[in-house]
């Protein structure tokens, strides 16, 4: 039997609203797996079903050969979980909180090591209620790791972190992978997904739109190059340019998705000369996950 | 078991560090008792105006020696006026004593305040009966050993209030503890976080209950200590039956708290509901004044309130009118048990972890 997590046709409804819609997914052991999706896509619900926190209306979750849906307590002893919204006792200190969680498990990591690893040494005697959002986030991660888990679930672990803290977090997550743990995380940051995730699933309306390595996803959906230029130039869909798949406006920029970069560029330069326009802000790049995401969901990641 | 212990320890730590919470738990009861201890003190002595023929009198001498009475000798007219105005509790008219006949002492008292009037008549009668025996020179036929009664006969308002305050505190601690503490943890996701640990819901529940019980018992101890040592309340403290009443009271109010917290989603929604439940009981259930002074129809309903059972049982025990063996005490206990079973059953159905 293949090692890892398997979700088979998971569905979850809240009243008439379908949060997760027969979702099927495989997460191999030992990798960092990213769940990407706009707000309300069903990421948290999916995670909570895998963690055994919610019962799916239909479907099954397997971990190795363990039925998580039927036996959540047992599975959970191998899992570490950072919930999207969770809080701790406000009047306990960071260290006391970790010690409390520490004493609830048999198999566990040392409190001191975790404090050091998550850069909480300075704050270990501070009350939880007085921590900044980023510090609380790190405490939550420390608590998720206290039972030395084989699979770590992180629901938007970098929400509210400054760039510095985010990089520290990335190091921690990559460290977890190098120790042989599986990490499943959700994120709204493309860069984060690109840096961390070995495989990704893009989710919307409760099902998987596509799944694969970041490179696979880009090649499958965005084989083309992207030309960006200032919106003030006035290029739009009515301008006939060779090899252009799509023209769209994003913020201040006009974006041209091209099958053939050279042909489009030549066409663009000719058009500019003919019309007497200046090509302000012109850049070219290969497609990113952000473009894939937009292509698949029609929505920006953080709208 | 281990989970319960570590959770209880954390919860207690959390409670003790919540200075504001502790302050409000103890502040009001202490201030209330302090204020009322002044109000009540004058009642421990009977202010007695004496109208007697001039010259030394054995009766007057004996009255003066008694700690129960505060004596003022005056004339008939002034005495009656003072009783009428309430500056004196009663006036005692002592005619010249004729050793061959029974002398009738006339006691005029103001019955505007029924409790004081009863106390006055009782004290004077008791005194005269004793004096009669003493002055007659005969050995007494009967002798009363005034044991428990020393507590009950000269009770001050503080003595009345203390058990009421303890009952009230039991209710507030349990109801508001659950209502503001647990609902808040539920709302903020603390409970969810423990849901993904090996802690079972029942273990968390047990730890929560132990936490509130410890808080309730310690604060009751502080209140009793303060009232008896500093304010000199004269009450009985039969520990075991009192403990039973306190625990049953907490059980009942914790269950009610769980019902409310289970049904409402946020702390903001819980507090008004808890106020709605606790306010009527606070004023009607005999905390500050006796249920018997309510209109009959109301009293008939109020007697079944859980706080009424707690207050009645506590007051009975602390005044010495009830013991653990009394039928009335058993009724209060049974009443509380019925409440616990009913509210506990509802709470276990309505409770939601999220
Ligand atoms: N307890 C609940 N009751 C009713 N509806 C719910 C509940 N939890 C989630 N939903 C709904 O299910 C859908 C999926 O929610 P979910 O939290 O899984 O989204 P998400 O992808 O995690 O979003 P976000 O990026 O904002 O965290 C949403 O439309 C949400 O409103
Ligand atoms: Mg979410």
Image: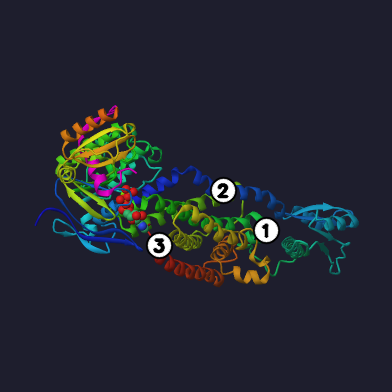
Asked if the residue under mark 1 is in contact with the one under mark 2, i.e. CB atoms within 8 Å, the reply is: no
Q: Residues within 10 Å of mark 2 (few under 14, many from 20)?
A: some
Alpha carbon distance from label 3 to label 1: 47 Å
**Does the magenta segment cover residue A299?**
yes
Query: What percent of the width, then of the height, locates residue A270?
Result: 22, 30
Q: Nearer the viewer, residue B347 or B130?
A: B347
Query: What percent of the width, then of the height, locates residue A150?
Result: 18, 48
Alpha carbon distance from label 2 to label 1: 20 Å
Which residue in the protein does label 1 denote? B154
User: Going from the N terminus, do you reach mark 3 or mark 1 first?
Assistant: 1
Query: What percent of the width, then of the height, locates residue B196?
Result: 29, 53
Query: What percent of the width, then of the height, locates residue A192?
Result: 24, 39
User: What chain does badge 1 belong to?
Assistant: B
What secondary structure is found at the residue carrying circle 2? helix
Which residue in the protein does label 2 denote? B226
Which residue occupies 21% across, 35% down? A171
Which residue in the protein does label 3 denote? B351
What secondary structure is found at the residue carrying circle 1? loop
User: Going from the N terminus, do you reach mark 3 or mark 2 first?
Assistant: 2
Q: Quadrant of residue B313?
A: bottom right
Residue B112 lies left or right of residue B259; in this view the side is right
Residue A130 lies left or right of residue A27; in this view the side is right
Residue B4 visible in the current orientation: no
In the image as oriented, which residue stretches furthest toward the left? A1
Alpha carbon distance from label 3 to label 2: 37 Å
Range of magenta residues: A278-303
């Amino acid at each position: 039997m293949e090692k890892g997590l398997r979700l088979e046709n998971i569905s979850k409804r809240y009243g008439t609203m379908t949060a997760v819609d027969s979702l099927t997914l495989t997460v191999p052991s030992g990798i960092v797996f990213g769940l990407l999706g706009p707000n309300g896509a069903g990421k948290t619900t999916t995670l909570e079903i895998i963690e055994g926190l919610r019962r799916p209306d239909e479907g099954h979750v397997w971990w190795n050969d363990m039925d998580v849906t039927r036996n959540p307590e047992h599975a959970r002893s191998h899992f570490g979980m950072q919930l999207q919204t969770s809080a701790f006792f406000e009047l306990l200190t960071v260290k006391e909180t970790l010690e409390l969680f520490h004493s609830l498990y048999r198999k566990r990591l040392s409190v001191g090591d975790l404090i050091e690893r998550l850069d909480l040494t300075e704050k270990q005697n501070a009350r939880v209620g007085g921590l900044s959002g980023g510090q609380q986030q790190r405490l939550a991660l420390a608590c998720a790791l206290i039972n030395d888990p084989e699979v770590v679930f992180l629901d938007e672990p970098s929400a509210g972190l400054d760039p510095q803290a985010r990089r520290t977090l990335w190091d921690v997550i990559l460290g977890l992978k190098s120790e042989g743990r599986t990490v499943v995380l959700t994120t709204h940051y493309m860069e984060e997904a690109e840096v961390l995730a070995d495989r990704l699933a893009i989710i919307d309306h409760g099902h998987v739109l596509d799944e694969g390595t970041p490179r696979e996803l880009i090649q499958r959906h965005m084989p083309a190059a992207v030309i960006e230029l200032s919106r003030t130039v006035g290029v739009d869909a009515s301008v006939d340019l060779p090899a252009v798949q799509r023209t769209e406006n994003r913020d201040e920029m006009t974006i041209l998705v091209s099958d053939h970069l050279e042909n489009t560029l030549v066409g663009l330069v000719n058009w500019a000369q003919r019309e007497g326009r200046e090509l302000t802000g012109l850049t070219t790049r290969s497609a990113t996950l952000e473009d894939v995401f937009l292509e698949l969901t029609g929505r920006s990641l953080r709208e | 078991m281990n989970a319960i212990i570590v959770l209880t320890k954390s919860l207690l730590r959390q409670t003790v560090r919540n200075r504001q919470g502790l302050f409000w738990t103890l502040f009001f009861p202490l201030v209330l008792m302090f204020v009322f201890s002044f109000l009540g003190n004058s009642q421990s002595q009977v202010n007695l105006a004496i109208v007697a023929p001039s010259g030394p009198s054995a009766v007057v001498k004996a009255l003066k020696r008694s700690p129960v009475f505060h004596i003022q000798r005056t004339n008939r007219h002034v005495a009656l006026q003072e009783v009428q105005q309430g500056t004196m509790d009663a006036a005692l008219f002592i005619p010249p004593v004729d050793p061959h006949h029974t002398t009738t002492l006339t006691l005029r008292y103001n019955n505007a305040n029924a409790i004081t009037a009863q106390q006055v008549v009782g004290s004077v009668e008791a005194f005269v009966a004793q004096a009669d025996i003493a002055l007659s020179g005969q050995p007494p036929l009967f002798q009363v050993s005034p044991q428990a009664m020393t507590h009950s006969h000269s009770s001050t308002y503080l003595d009345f209030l203390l058990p009421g305050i303890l009952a009230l505190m039991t209710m507030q601690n349990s109801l508001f503890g659950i209502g503001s503490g647990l609902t808040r943890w539920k709302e903020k996701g603390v409970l969810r976080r423990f849901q993904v640990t090996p802690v079972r819901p029942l273990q968390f529940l047990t730890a929560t209950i132990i936490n509130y019980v410890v808080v309730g018992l310690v604060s009751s101890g502080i209140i009793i200590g303060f009232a008896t040592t500093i304010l000199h309340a004269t009450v009985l403290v039969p520990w075991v039956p009192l403990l039973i009443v306190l625990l049953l009271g907490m059980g009942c109010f914790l269950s009610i708290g769980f019902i409310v917290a289970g049904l409402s989603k946020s702390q903001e929604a819980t507090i008004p509901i808890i106020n709605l439940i606790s306010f009527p009981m606070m004023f009607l259930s005999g905390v500050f004044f006796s249920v018997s002074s309510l209109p009959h129809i109301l009293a008939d309903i109020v007697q079944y309130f859980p706080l009424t059972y707690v207050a009645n049982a506590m007051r009975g025990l602390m005044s010495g009118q009830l013991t653990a063996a009394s039928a009335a005490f058993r009724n209060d206990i049974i009443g509380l048990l019925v409440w616990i079973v009913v509210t506990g059953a509802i709470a276990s159905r309505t409770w939601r972890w999220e």
